Amino acid sequence: MSRVENKNLAKCINFLSKVDIPVLNQTARSLTELCEVEENVSARSIAHIVKHDPLMTVKLMRYLQHHKHRVQEHEVMEVEQVLLMLGLETALKEVPASPSVEDVLGSKRMSALASLLRVTHRANLASAYAFDWAVRLNDLHYEEVRIAALLHDIAEILMWCFASKYMLQIRDLQQQDKTLRSSTVQEKVLGFTLHQLQLELSVKWRLPKLLITLVNGDYDEVNQQRVRTVTLAVNLARHSANGWNDAALPDDYEDIAELLNLKVSDIKIIVGAEEQHA
C-alpha cells in the first residue's frame, strides 16, 4: 500500500497529529516534585524524567518539529537537546505533563490502561537494553539507538490511548484464535496495521531517522548494527514480558551474543535472566 492510501489511516494520522498527547501519571508527579525546588530544575533533570515516558518524549519531539526554525537542519535526537532548544520555561509551559493517560481513558477502561502500561514498561526495558548494548559496541549514536527503542511501539501506545475500544477487540480476537496474524486482525478491525501507522507517524512527525529506517525495513550496512541492536532489544523486552521461560528467549540470547561477541551465559547475566532463575 502506498503511503497514506488508506482513508482510515489518513484520518487517524490527522487526528493523532493534532490531539493533545497524554502522559503517564508518574511523569506528571515527578515533574511537579522536581519543579518545587527551583535549583533542581535543569535540562538534564527534566530529561531524566521525560525519557522514561515514551508518550511525553514523543509529545516534546512533535512540538519541536512544529515550532523549529527553518534554519535548523540537523536532527535533534536527545530529549535534553530538545529542552535546550525550546528553553526550559517554554517547554514546561507549552508542553505540559497533562492530560494524564488515566484521565483520557477514564475509569471504565481499566483493562485498556493495564495493556497500555504493559507496552510502556516494555518500551522502557527495550530502551535500557538498547542503550547498554550501544555503549558496549562503542556506538557514538547511543542516544538515537535508545530513543528508537523507546518509541518503537509508540503507535500501539497511542492507539491504546485513543482507540482502546478497537485495541481491546484486536486483543480479544487474538486470544480467541492464537493462529491469527497480528497484521490480519489489525486490518480487519482498524482498516490498517499498526506497522503502517508507525511508519506514517514517524515520517510526518520527523522522528529519529533510525526509527523510520527500522519501521520501513530499508537500511544499509552503515545502519545494520544499530538496527539490529534496537530490533533485538525490542524482541527481548517483548518475549521476556511473557516470563523468562518464553520459548523465543533462547534464540534471543544467541542473537544478542552474536551482536556483542559474547557467550550466551554472559548475555543471560547482563539482561538479568539468571537472577530470575536464581
Image (cartoon, rainbow, N blue to C red):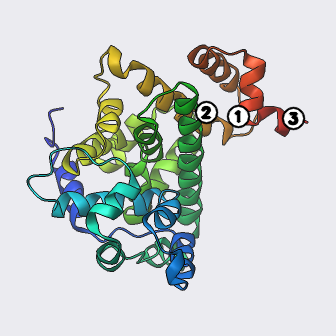
Asked whether the beta carbons under mark 1 and mark 2 sit within 8 Å of each other, the answer is yes
Q: Tag 2: residue type?
A: Leu
Crowd rating for badge 3 (residues with CA inside 10 Å; few <14, some 14–19, many 20+): few
Q: Tag 1: residue type?
A: Val
Q: Position of residue 98 (x, y in %)?
A: 41, 77
Q: Residue 271 carries which label?
A: 1
Q: Residue at x 35, y 38 (%)?
A: 211
Q: Is residue 49 above or below residue 146?
A: below
In this rendering, does residue 58 appear at all? yes
Callout in the foreground (1, 3): 1
Marks 1/3: CA–CA distance: 12 Å
Question: Which residue is tagged 3?
Answer: 277
Would you say 9 lies left or right of 80 here?
left
163, 174: nearer the viewer: 163
Q: Earlier in the sequence, mark 1 or mark 3?
A: 1
Q: Earlier in the sequence, mark 1 or mark 2?
A: 2
Q: Where is residue 134 in the image (x, y as percent from the top left)?
A: 52, 31
In this rendering, does residue 165 appear at all? no
183, 101: nearer the viewer: 101
Q: Which mark is residue 211?
A: none
Crowd rating for badge 2 (residues with CA inside 10 Å; few <14, some 14–19, many 20+): many
Q: Tag 3: residue type?
A: His
Residue lying at the far front in this picture: please name it. 39
Q: Residue 236 carries which label?
A: 2
Q: Which of marks 3 and 2 is nearer the N terminus?
A: 2
Q: In which quarter of the image is residue 97?
A: bottom left
Helix, strand or loop status at disc 1:
helix
Helix, strand or loop status at disc 3:
helix
Q: Which residue is drawn at 38% across and 50% down?
A: 78
